[in-house]
Amino acid sequence: MTLVLGTTAVVAQGPSTFPNRFIRIVSQFAAGSVSDITLRILGDRVGARLKTQVIVENMPTGGGLLAARTVKTSAADGHTLALLSNATAVTAAMFKNPGFDPLVDFLPVTGMSDFAYVMLVNDQSQYRSVRDLVAAARAKPGTLNVGTSAPGTTPYLTALLLKKAAGIDFAVVPFRGASDLTIALLRNDIDLVINAYGAVRQNLVDKQLRAIATTAMSRSPFLPDVPTVHESGIANFEVSSWNGIFAPANTPDAAVGRLAQEMQSALAEPDLIKIFLERGVEVWPAKAPDLSARMRAEIVRWNKVIEDAGIERE
């Protein structure tokens, strides 16, 4: 009788439903960054929809190595996810063996956000456009200094891509952080900076810096009067960065599907779209096939940029 009752109890209980505990999203970005803030906003909305808590865990290391490796080896049950990005694609291209393959070790859940970079000069600069900079670089090769974030980051590689696409030569000067970049530009230590809009928005408002171009194919909603690099004479030049949610490989389809549904529904909420825009990024609720395709395309692209620049892979 005990065995029958015990068996009956188990059958009546049935399989556990998803989610059955809190969800952890491991992020490669530092706490307080735009990517972190927007992820937490999305996490709160999704947690309310799934009736569970969504916790963001920050693991900010170069190229997002630690975050990706952590999630790769986590239980594939939908309760541990990764915020991967364009930086992940760059890492996959830059490292001989990063310890993970973003196309094999992860399943795409949904895109989250997207943003172009801004090319900026000091507001007092003589350079008024990309054409001015290209002309100056051709007149005196190697004399211009372009500031970016650290080597191996998307802005750094964007500068290398610009050299190749425009057929010009200039020095790429990497800095540790956005504030160091801005200070150097304000001091006229460098001629141009490539950075995210969110990092320089206040400097633009205060008219300390001036945007001369944005790097997406279409104009930025934040700077609608600023031309793209493509419009400025460097045909088909296009770079934008993105963030997306991924699950470990072999996570059940049901869990991935539920997560995608609730996350994309949250990303469609008008007030969330507005909040993202206020922080300098656009909502990008890409479905799994599009997210996977973008990761693949970015790996191919940055692999070529790295090869063309003669950068030795680590």
Image (tube, grey):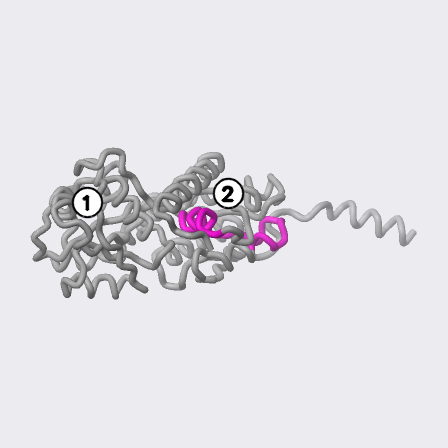
Residue 121, by quadrant, is bottom left
Q: Secondary structure at mark 2?
A: strand
Q: Which residues are magenta?
A: 71-95
Mark nearest the camera among 1 and 2 is 1
Residue that appears at 25% across and 65% down: 180
Q: Position of residue 172 (x, y in %)?
A: 26, 55
Residue that appears at 10% across and 47% down: 128
Residue 35, by quadrant, is bottom left
Give amino acid for label 2.
Val
Q: Secondary structure at mark 1?
A: strand
Q: Is residue 231 visible to the viewer in this orientation of the structure?
A: yes
Mark 1 highlights which residue? 213
Residue most extreme to the right? 1
Sequence order check, earlier mark of 1 and 2: 2
Give amino acid for label 1.
Ala
Q: Position of residue 291 (x, y in %)?
A: 45, 39
Is 205 colored magenta in this rendering? no
Cα separation between marks 1 and 2: 32 Å
Q: Nearer the viewer, residue 190 or 24?
A: 190
Q: Position of residue 224 (x, y in %)?
A: 18, 42
Q: Is residue 45 visible to the viewer in this orientation of the structure?
A: no
Residue that appears at 53% across and 52% down: 97
Q: Position of residue 3 (x, y in %)?
A: 89, 51
Whether residues under marks 1 and 2 lie with C-beta atoms below 8 angstroms apart, the answer is no
Viewed as shown, does residue 300 lie left or right of 131? right
Disc marking residue 161? none
Residue that appears at 41% across and 51% down: 87
Residue 199, by quadrant, is bottom left
Mark 2 highlights which residue? 109
